[in-house]
Image (tube, rainbow, N blue to C red):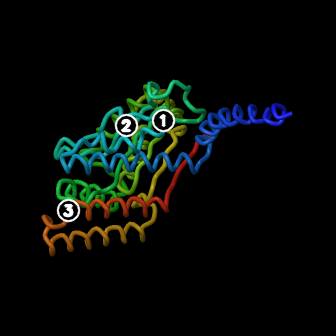
Amino acid sequence: MAQQASSPACPTTATTTTTWTELTNTSWRDDDYRRMVMAYLIEAVYLLELERQERRDAAAVAQQWWEPFQFRLAHELVDDRDGSVFGAVFERDHQASPTPTPSGAPSAVVAFRGALLRAPTIRRDVEDRLRLLARDSLRGSARLARAAQALSATVDRFGSENVCVCGHSLGAGFARQVVRMLVASSPRQQQQQQQQAAAASLEYHLFNAPYLSLPMGVRGVLRTADCLLKALRSGVAKWRGKALRNVAYANCILGYTRLESTRKL
């Protein structure tokens, strides 16, 4: 009788193991989960640049933001003028897990960070942010061509239906701009139609894009100006380290409360 009473435990254990796999697959079909992963990958781009500025092993610190989701850092998008990391391409890490790619999970993600108010990056970041707010476009940015090339190469490799694009604040501007450029990049009508279809099937997540709402954009400029004024008053050399890092993280997290996204059904 004791053996009969304990026998239902076996099916329960087996069901739990199966349910975990099913849960992973199901999570990627949930919009909130997808947005959460995109936010993590954007945060990883912030960390790559912040740790680079601190002259530490950036990938070793930032990998905790992509490894739990079975991604790997394929390559960084670097501004040649100052060496800053403004974006990154993440690809599915099939070596990290022998299980098949979860249903609905993207094969690659192109992520862009927002502005960082630190001495090594403040000039280029604010320059691009003001360009975006004034023109609703990033045309003229030295980073734009590299960002567009990265997206185009990623789409060519994996297919547009398997690629996600995401960005926060200024990075959301880059994300939208490169998708627009993908549509308009081909002069031939047939190729242009193919690229338009590819761009239409691209999934994107834009967190706190500065031009989505003019009042919010204006407030963003005022916050930037206020931070610059404080930096000048107290001295940039004194305004560094953990304090600046916390400001960047706080801005990033607060920005996630306002987003624009599209999802292929």
**237 sits left or right of 222 in the view:** left
Q: Nearer the viewer, residue 6 or 91?
A: 6
Q: Which residue is mark 3?
A: 240
Q: Nearer the viewer, mark 2 or mark 1?
A: 2
Q: Could you tell me which residue is drawn at 27 percent across and 43 percent down?
A: 58
- The amino acid sitting under disc 1 is Val
Is 114 drawn above or below residue 59 in the view shown? below
Q: Which residue is mark 2?
A: 89
Residue 227, given in percent of the width and then of the height, sits at: 25, 70
Residue 8, given in percent of the width and then of the height, sits at: 79, 35
Which image quarter is the C terminus in? top right
Which numbered tag is attached to residue 45?
A: none
- The amino acid sitting under disc 3 is Arg
Q: Are marks 3 and 1 in contact (CB under 8 Å)?
A: no
Which numbered tag is attached to residue 163?
A: 1
Q: Residues within 10 Å of mark 2 (few under 14, many from 20)?
A: many
Sequence-first tag of 2 and 1: 2
Cα separation, mark 2 vs mark 1, equals: 10 Å
**113 sits left or right of 49 in the view:** right
Which image quarter is the N terminus in? top right
Sequence-first tag of 2 and 3: 2
Is 212 drawn above or below residue 219 in the view shown? above
Sequence-first tag of 3 and 1: 1
